[in-house]
Image (cartoon, grey):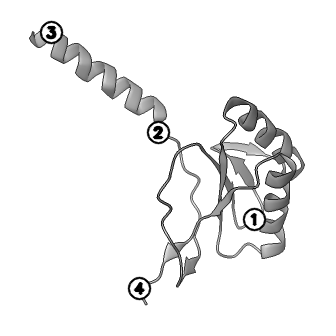
Amino acid sequence: MIDIVFLLIVFFMTVAKMQVQERVEIDVPIAANAVIPEDRSSRVVVTIQNDGSLFFGSQPIAVQDMTAYVQQAREDSPRIKVYIRADARVPFKEVRKLFAAAAAGGVPNVIFASFQSDK
């Protein structure tokens, strides 16, 4: 009996470790009306740093390649959502390009990351 419990523990520890995504460090903007989404499933994380570096998950990509990455992710999971994490100092015109690339890739459902303010 203890062998089975041990095997289950090892299995779940291995599976849980595989699902952890490495995050790219940024300063997330603060918004007074930020809302934490209820449904956190089927997300693809896209991060843009202050210097303009773009990451699809933890993989560096070019802005012009984002549409192809989103299309591939949509083929793997049709109900996917794009979760954009942009540094607070990134101009919004750069973030808007990511919204357009997600829509061009067939994913109009985009979530923008921000912290809730204390107000």
Quarter of the rendering containing residue 50? bottom right
Work out which residue is located at the far left of the displayed protein and give it. Answer: 1
Q: Residues within 10 Å of mark 2 (few under 14, many from 20)?
A: few
* Residue that mark 4 sits on: 118
Residue visible at 41% across and 85% down?
118
x and y percent of residue 57 in the render?
64, 44
Badge 2 amino acid: Val
Q: How many marks?
A: 4
Gap between marks 4 and 3 measured at Cα:
49 Å
Callout 1: few (<14), some (14-19), or many (20+) C-alpha neighbours within 10 Å?
Answer: few
- 27 is higher (above) or lower (below) than 103: below
Query: Mark 1 and 2 residues: CB-CB less than 8 Å, in contact?
Result: no
Q: Which residue is mark 2?
A: 20
Determine whether the residue tagged by mark 1 lies in a helix, strand or loop.
Answer: loop
Calculate the distance from the C-alpha at mark 1 to the C-alpha at mark 2.
25 Å
Viewer-nearest residue: 26 or 8: 8
